Image (spheres, grey):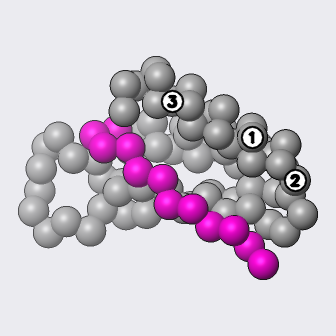
Amino acid sequence: METKEKIEFTGLPLAVYREIAAHLRQVAGVKVSLIPQSSQQFDYHQSQISGLWISWIPNSGSESQQRVQQILAYYQNRYGV
C-alpha cells in the first residue's frame, strides 16, 4: 500500500513548488503531485498551489523517506516556512 502525505508551505510561489516537486521526483520510489489552490478569493500573496501530495511506493525504503525529509528541511530553511 502506498503511503501518502500532504505538504503545505504557506506563501511559496508556484515556481518554488515546482522546484521542490522536481527535486523530490528524483528520489527513488517517490511520486509528487501539485495541489491547485482551492480558494475562491484572489490573494496576491497566496500561491497558485496550496500544497504537494508526496507518495511513497511500497518497499521504497527508509533511505528514500529520509532523503525526502532532508529536501523538505532544506526548502523550509531556505524560504523560512
Question: In screen coordinates, is 37 left or right of 59?
Answer: left
Q: Looking at the picture, tell me which residue is in the foreground, 49 or 68.
A: 68
* Residue depicted at 11% across the width and 56% down the height: 42
Magenta stretch, residue numbers: 1-12
* Residue depicted at 57% across the width and 62% down the height: 5
Q: Dot 2 lies on which element?
A: helix
For disc 3, the marked residue is: 75
Residues tagged 1 and 3 counted as in contact (Cβ below 8 A): no
> Quick one: quadrant of the N terminus?
bottom right
Marking on residue 61? 2
Neighbours of disc 2 within 10 Å: few (<14), some (14-19), many (20+) = few
* Front label number (1 vs 3): 1
Percent position of residue 50, x then y: 35, 56
Q: Residue 29 sits in which quadrant?
A: bottom right
As displayed, is residue 40 above or below residue 46? below
Q: Looking at the picture, tell me which residue is in the foreground, 53 or 44.
A: 53
Neighbours of disc 1 within 10 Å: few (<14), some (14-19), many (20+) = few
For disc 1, the marked residue is: 66
Neighbours of disc 3 within 10 Å: few (<14), some (14-19), many (20+) = some
As displayed, is residue 49 above or below residue 4? above
Q: Earlier in the sequence, mark 1 or mark 3?
A: 1
Q: Amino acid at mark 3?
A: Tyr
Q: Earlier in the sequence, mark 2 or mark 3?
A: 2
Q: Residue 27 sits in which quadrant?
A: top right
Q: Amino acid at mark 2?
A: Gly
Question: In screen coordinates, is 9 left or right of 42?
Answer: right
